[in-house]
Amino acid sequence: MRILLLNPPHTAIGSRCVPDDHLPPLGLLSIGGPLLDAGHQVELLDADLTNMEHDVIVDEVCRRAPEALLVGHAGSTSAHPTIAKLTAAIRQRAPGIVIVYGGVFPTYHWREVLSEQPQVDVIVRGEGEDTAVKLMAALEAGSPLDDVKGIAFRKLGAPLATGDAPAIVDLDAYRTGWELIDFSRYHYWGNKRAVVMQFSRGCPHLCSYCGQRGFWTRWRHRDPKKFAKEIAHLVRNHGIEIVNLADENPTSQRKAWKEFCEALIAEGVDVELVGSTRAGDIVRDADLLHLYKKAGVSRFLLGTESTDEATLEKIKKGSTTKVDFEAIRLLREHDILSLATWVVGFEEERARDYWRGFKQLLHADPDQVQLLYVTPHRWTGFFDEAKDRRVIQTDQRRWDYKHQVLETRHLPPWLVVSFVKLMEVGMQLRPTALKRLWHRDPKIRSAQRWYYRIGRRVWFFEWTNWLFREQRTTNGPTVAAMWGKGQVAEEFPNVVTKRVKVKAEAVTTAA
């Protein structure tokens, strides 16, 4: 079959404010590799890379005349309105194209999508590598879709989901379709050639606000040596300088992560790794951090989320401020940058809560900081906690963690955003942070200066958006009224049991 993978333009900061820094759409490339190996003719249209206009995208899709259009975006929830508009226009122009939609949002909202978007023919639910191959085979053969696990479609006019597809146990069984991209067009950290990759999928922790933990069903990792070899291949043959790890928690298993670091060191390539991990894993691996650095780890994002212990306990973070602060100290000791996230909106904050949090962030002294707004997705535990709170942002395109969507009873929205923007300025203009702009390590020095350049652009862009472009409501619906019933019970059934097993495994391998 002739298949076109479409990465639509997005309304997020990355697409509007930092046009020179883009990463390849890993989700679509992960589907593309298996489809190519199955004998299909596959192309990628990355409309987000150049922020293509809608009419131009529709024209290009029609010009390429695929038999099947597979569409998805990493910013799944906030990208949905754009995808809905695009696919409707494509259906009108090319009624014979089979439109397949995948990602976290359609995985859980399949009923609503199939009911409200008649142009969408099939939804891939959960991991797509195996499911997409089986779906395309069924479509090509004209076979019934009922036998394809992990999809949703209409039968007799009504939305129907087939059984859940099992989690992919062997992540090395399916390759990424790197041949679908021009590597020279993707950059990160200041015009450094970059890709995004996954060492592992899933997370063994139970944070109530996380929108990813149920989607991946359980924590698994690739073969450490094979993963290191693939990175080395990309460096040597395609000039890759930065690998952004898309994992929720790549360091969950100490033994596997240590083996990967050693394998990448043995490859002898000059590459930088950036990603996210748990503060507890950094503290656990205090004796391995020299391997992290030697392997190329330049920065880890630490989801500190809050500096209030009661909030951390309520959201089931499974960490403490003491552990978070120690992780930041250890990373600095080994010349690895720390990016601390701090999330507002978990509780009905007052001005004193922001002041206390700011002082504690100053004490933690991370190299970089990212302030976010909690966003209640239907498939998370936090949704049920927040279901009766009022929504001030009904535009789904803004539900991306970078926009305030929930009302705060004690503070008006303008004061919340003011506190957030002032905290960002205070954190980045403190003397200890500015000093790192002249760090002895040239890679750290370069990364910090890039971060300040981008941060300045984003800061003004967000203020301009808030003041002149965004529309908020003063009497919005409740979270439940806007989205419907919570879906935490619909997490794929092997989530909890598998997560507990992996957590125990991580503890024993740390000993």
Image (spheres, helix red, strand yellow):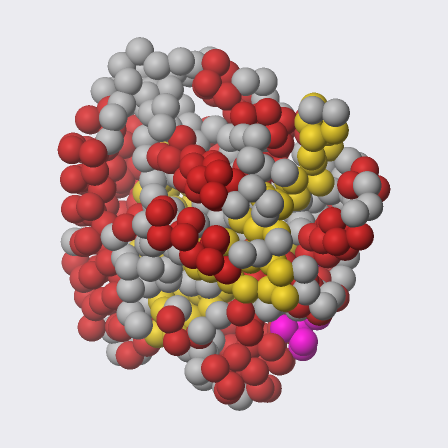
Q: Is residue 378 among what the camera can see?
A: no
Q: Which is nearer the eye, 476 or 432?
A: 476
Query: Where is 497 relative to 138, above or below?
Result: above
- Residue 181: x, y in percent? 49, 70
Q: Is residue 27 magenta?
A: no
Question: Which quadrant would residue 419 be assigned to in this image?
Answer: top left
At 51% from the left and 86% from the top, the residue drawn is 237
Query: Where is 136 relative to 75, above or below?
Result: below
133 displayed left or right of 299: right
432 displayed left or right of 58: left
Question: Which quadrant would residue 474 be assigned to in this image?
Answer: top left
At 29% from the left and 79% from the top, the residue drawn is 442
Q: Which is nearer the eye, 110 or 504?
A: 110
- Residue 195: x, y in percent? 47, 68
At 29% from the left and 64% from the top, the residue drawn is 20
Q: Which residues are magenta?
A: 220-227
